[in-house]
């Protein structure tokens, strides 16, 4: 079992650009969530996908959007990047009511 | 609004010591609580999951307790080792499909 895998591991983008991050959940997991972690802070919830629909959303602007595919993998899209979007982006997967498992994250730097 | 606090923010101990990390939460209506470990620049590794009906969970040298009524959890690490050096995060879930709400973590350094 490969666990939760995220790609890419590192990314540098320019202000105003758009970025797509990808996540493959752990085998058997059907729920995928995305988190943003700034340096020295705990992860902040962005949104959660289940059955290809956004089920919950944290306090993030509409520039942050996502998608879940039939194979449960997911994408996080961020439009009109700001310097403040620089962070570690974490994907977590789990079964319903189960333990959450995280990927290694994508480090996004906006310059 | 649920808030999670972890004390202390940083902790340095000599190798071999037993230690306790603290986590408190403001709303006792949680579904479960999870402890994670995070190495610098890396993702989160799940250590222990405690369901709201449970009082504690153990894995190797780690023991986590949960007191829902007082809004507290502790992570006990026995016989600490330099390899335990990392940031430890606790997170609570408000429902079966709920998102995780994290504290800011405790940065642990175990000196040889």
Image (cartoon, coloured by chain):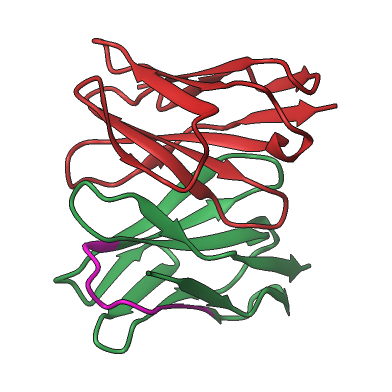
State the residue in front, B36 or A83.
A83
Question: Most extreme residue toward the right, as rendered?
Answer: A111
Q: Which chain shows up in green?
A: B
Which residue corresponds to the image point at 46% horizontal and 25% vertical from the top-left?
Answer: A65
Say which quarter of the image contains residue A49: top left
Q: Position of residue A102 (x, y in %)?
A: 45, 38
Q: Is residue B45 left or right of residue B105?
A: left
Say how many tags the image has: 0
Chain A tint as drawn: red
Tell me which residue sits at (79%, 23%) in the image: A15
Magenta range is B21-32
Residue A47 picture location, percent across and down: 39, 37
Magenta stretch contains residue B24:
yes
| Residue A86 falls inside the magenta stretch | no
Q: Residue at x 55, y 28 (%)?
A: A63
B69 over B59 or under it: above or below: below
Q: Is residue B77 visible?
A: no
């Amino acid at each position: 079992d490969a666990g939760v895998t995220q790609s890419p591991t590192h990314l540098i983008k320019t202000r105003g650009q758009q970025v797509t991050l990808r996540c493959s959940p752990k085998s058997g997991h059907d729920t995928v969530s995305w988190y943003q972690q700034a340096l020295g802070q705990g992860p902040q919830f962005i949104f959660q996908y289940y059955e290809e629909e956004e089920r919950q959303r944290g306090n993030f602007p509409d520039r942050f959007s996502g998608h879940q595919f039939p194979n449960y993998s997911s994408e996080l899209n961020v439009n009109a990047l700001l310097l403040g979007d620089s962070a570690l982006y974490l994907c977590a997967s789990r079964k319903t009511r189960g333990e959450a498992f995280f990927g290694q994250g994508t480090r996004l730097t906006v310059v | 609004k649920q808030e999670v606090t972890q004390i202390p923010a940083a902790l340095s101990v000599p190798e071999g010591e037993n230690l306790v990390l603290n986590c408190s939460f403001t709303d006792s209506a949680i579904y479960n609580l999870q402890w994670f470990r995070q190495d610098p620049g890396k993702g989160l590794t799940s250590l222990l999951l405690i369901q709201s009906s449970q009082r504690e969970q153990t894995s190797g040298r780690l023991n986590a307790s949960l007191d829902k009524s007082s809004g507290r959890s502790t992570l006990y690490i026995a016989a600490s080792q330099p390899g335990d050096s990392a940031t430890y995060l606790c997170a609570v879930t408000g429902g079966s499909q709920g998102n995780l709400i994290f504290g800011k973590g405790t940065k642990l350094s175990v000196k040889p």
